[in-house]
Image (tube, rainbow, N blue to C red):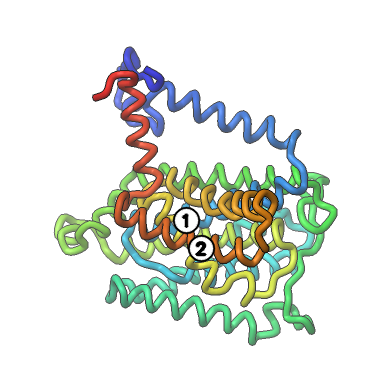
Amino acid sequence: MFYREAGDFKVSYEQDSQTFPIKFDRYRYYLVLLIAFLVIPFTINDYWASAILLPFLIYSIAAIGLNILVGYAGQVSLGTGGFMAVGAYACYKLMTAFPEVSMFVHVLLAGGVTALVCVLFGLPSLRIKGFYLAVATLAAQFFLVWVFNRVPWFYNYSASGQINAPERDVFGIVITGPNAPAWATYLFCLIFLTLCAIVARNLTRGTVGRSWMAIRDMDIAAEIIGVNPLKAKLTAFAVSGFFIGISGALFFALYLGAVEVGEAFGITKSFQVLFMVIIGGLGSIFGSFAGAAFLVLLPVVLKVVGVDVLGWPTDIVAHFQLVIVGALIVLFLIVEPHGLAQLWRVAKEKLRLWPFPH
């Protein structure tokens, strides 16, 4: 009753193959975009931007990229933090070398550089898979962090070894540096997230996405029916790297402002994004959003409840966060392996027939 599709008829193949074939879904999607673009920028403040909105937008892009690789193509990766570092350092070098070029171009080029690096480290996937591929991508994580720490050219020979985002503007509005207004950085990240989500959704529903899923489900059978495993696996690594590189560039330039690679893009970051994908749901674009929102909001909720309400020490609450995330991952893997996305699908099915029980 709440979720209705009665009378929503389709009269063409184009209508039947829409991203949101049900009218109620389309209206809800338009409403969310309307609020995101026209309401939140006028009500946002620095706390909401730095604590919730910017991390959610940036981690959503990273989770979409990793979900394409792990959830759709079935290629296990533990190198997300290192690939985000490639995007961050590529963006930094471009910002300092070409200060007159728009930040949109810098972020896109940083994504392109990360895609190339990701393809390079994805070459072992042509011969190995599963646990062995996970070890290979984990090696890429440690190797990339080591390179960015040890080669001074990447951080412009800075004595501290850090990289700092210079102040840049788009159409006269500052979006990087300490003077950037919260609404400007939020809108910049939101535009990239919207574009990435639309591209990812259309890719996964097309020929490329079906070849990824065929390789994931049974690579030998996919090759027999004509799917090229070389093309499918490397395109998955390239698209995934492009999105992860964009998220790394935004994470450095708009969110942190100053980065030390071992602290910001260590192995913890790789596992954090992987947990977002697992909790949200493998093989689901919506699951990437849900997992990112969950793991961004969880520390904020625990801090409010534990520190402000119950008066617990901050370090105890931080340890509880690790315990809760670990317990939830185990719970989801046992009870609902498809994560929050599957729970949302079940809820929609129930709402279609509510208040009837079946």
Residue 139 picture quarter: bottom left
Q: How many marks?
A: 2
Residue 329 position within the rendered picture, expressed as x and y whole percent measured from the top left: 40, 58
Residue 68 position within the rendered picture, expressed as x and y whole percent measured from the top left: 40, 55
Taking depth in this image into account, of 107 and 23 the one nearest to the observer is 23
State the mark number for residue 117: none
| Left or right position of 117 against 89 | left
Looking at the rendered image, the quarter that the C terminus falls into is top left
Disc 2: CA contacts within 10 A as few (<14), some (14-19) or many (>=20) = some
| Left or right position of 77 against 128 | right
**Residue appearing at x 34%, y 21% in the figure:** 354
Residue 259 position within the rendered picture, expressed as x and y whole percent measured from the top left: 70, 70
C-alpha distance separating marks 1 and 2: 6 Å
Residue 42 picture quarter: top right
Taking depth in this image into account, of 300 and 221 the one nearest to the observer is 300
**Residue appearing at x 59%, y 70% in the figure:** 265
To which residue does mark 2 refer?
Answer: 272
Q: Secondary structure at mark 1?
A: helix
Q: Secondary structure at mark 2?
A: helix
Residue 121 position within the rendered picture, expressed as x and y whole percent measured from the top left: 43, 74
To which residue does mark 1 refer?
Answer: 276
Kindly indicate whether the residue at mark 2 contacts the one at mark 1 (C-beta within 8 angstroms).
Answer: yes
Q: Amino acid at mark 1?
A: Met
Q: Amino acid at mark 2?
A: Gln
| Left or right position of 309 against 29 | right
Q: Is residue 314 positioned above or below 124 on the image? A: above
Can residue 349 be seen?
yes
